Structure formats: C-alpha cells, structure tokens
Image (tube, helix red, strand yellow):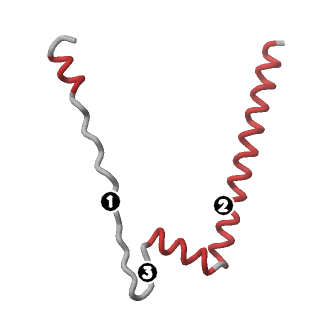
Amino acid sequence: MVVYRQKRTEVQSLQTEVERLQKENSQYANQIKSLKSDPAAIEKEAREQLHYTRPGEVVYVVPDPPQKPPSGRAKNDAKNGH
C-alpha cells in the first residue's frame, strides 16, 4: 500500500512536470513563429541580443557588477585554529 501511494505521488509529480514542459514548449513555438513572421519581434531580438540600433541611436552597455571576493574569514579562522 505504501509503494502504491509513493507511485501515485510520483505520477502526479511527473504529470505536473509534463504540463509545465508542454506550456514552455508552446511558448517557445509561439516565439519561433513570431521571429519568423513578426517584424516587431525580430527588431526586439536584434536590439536586445545583438545591440542593433537605428541610425542616430547610441547603445550603452552596462557591465555586470563585479563579483564580491571571498571575505577571507574562513582562512583567518583556520589559521587561528578556529
């Protein structure tokens, strides 16, 4: 009986995952369709992904913030025997 409940829970989990993946797949299919036929979608992707501009426009690219270096606390604690 316990195994049956576990398998039933697993089936429900897998069904939820399948539904999520089907929804995601549908969104990708719609995006592909738009990129094949919708000039506004094509322009949006060109601007965002390739940084294309129209004549007279300027693109400013902001770099990602620098990664925080490790605090070194663990190293200090190891040296002091903590």
Residue count near mark 1 (Cα–Cα under 10 Å), binned few <14, some 14–19, many ≥20 = few
What label does residue 28 carry, if any? 2
23 vs 47: above or below = above
- Residue 37, x across and y down, in percent: 67, 79
Badge 3 vs badge 2, beta-carbon distance below 8 Å: no
Quarter residue 50 falls in = bottom left
Q: How far apart are marks 3 and 2 (CA)?
A: 25 Å
In the picture, which quadrant includes the C terminus?
top left
Q: How far apart are marks 2 and 1 (CA)?
A: 28 Å
Residue at left offset 74%, top offset 43%: 18
Task: Tally the numbered discs.
Answer: 3
**Dot 3: element:** loop
Closest to the camera, between mark 2 and mark 1, is: 1
The answer to whether residue 5 is left or right of residue 21 is: right
Badge 2 vs badge 1, beta-carbon distance below 8 Å: no
What label does residue 63 carry, if any? 1
Which three-letter amino acid code belongs to the residue tagged 3?
Thr
Residue count near mark 3 (Cα–Cα under 10 Å), binned few <14, some 14–19, many ≥20 = few
Residue at left offset 37%, top offset 74%: 59
Sequence-wise first label, 1 or 3: 3
Residue count near mark 2 (Cα–Cα under 10 Å), binned few <14, some 14–19, many ≥20 = few
Q: Can you name the residue that lies furthest to the left here?
A: 79
Q: Provide the residue designation for mark 3.
A: 53
